Image: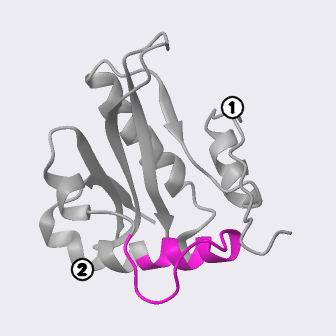
Amino acid sequence: MSVIVRKATLNDLPVLLEFEQGVITAERPFDPTIKGGDINYYDINELITSQYSDVYVAESNGDIVASGYAKIKTDRHYLKHAYQGYLGFMFVSDTHRGQGLNKMIIDALLKWCKARNIYEIRLDVYDDNIPAIKAYEKVGFKKHMINMRLDIENLD
């Protein structure tokens, strides 16, 4: 299987919008706070065109089979770094999982961040999404902080 990783273009939007729905479908079981129906997480057009972010895709035999983005974010004033690279929109199509595509996308995103002197890299993953956590740990990410929630609507 021949795979190339490249920057996404606006011509890729139809496939990327499908991938976005794949991410949402995969995450709904982990998050009861996600609205039902049609929603969007990202402004993919903006992520592709902004100077502060970029979307990368993996292509196999002319088909886009994986995606991810990096975005430069201003970080909190009390941290050692002023900016962080935030990764998101990590998606690999069902038929191409387990082939190292997530690592290929992350490697391209990390290279993009390093070229902009961004060395602190963060991402969010649901605590119960064990396969995703393992994939991120495999490329060097470590658990850092846990975000906790409580729904008090029906609490006495």
The percent position of residue 26, horizontal first and vertical second, equals 60, 74
Which of the two discs, 1 and 2, sits closer to the camera? Answer: 1
Q: Which mark is residue 14?
A: 2
Identity, as a three-letter code, of the amino acid under mark 1 = His
Q: Nearer the viewer, residue 113 or 143?
A: 143
The percent position of residue 81, horizontal first and vertical second, equals 43, 14
N-terminal of the two: label 1 or label 2? Answer: 2
Is 155 left, or right, of 149 in this rendering?
Answer: right
The answer to whether residue 29 is above or below residue 140 is below
Q: Which mark is residue 144?
A: 1
Quarter of the rendering containing residue 45 = bottom left
State which region is magenta. Answer: 21-40
> Residue at 27% of width from left, 24% of height from top?
115
The percent position of residue 133, horizontal first and vertical second, equals 70, 50
The answer to whether residue 115 is above or below residue 37 is above
Contact? badges 1 and 2 (CB < 8 Å): no
Quarter of the rendering containing residue 116 = top left
Model colouring: one colour
Residue 61 can be seen, yes or no: no
> Residue at 44% of width from left, 52% of height from top?
88
Which element type, helix, strand or loop, lies under badge 1? loop
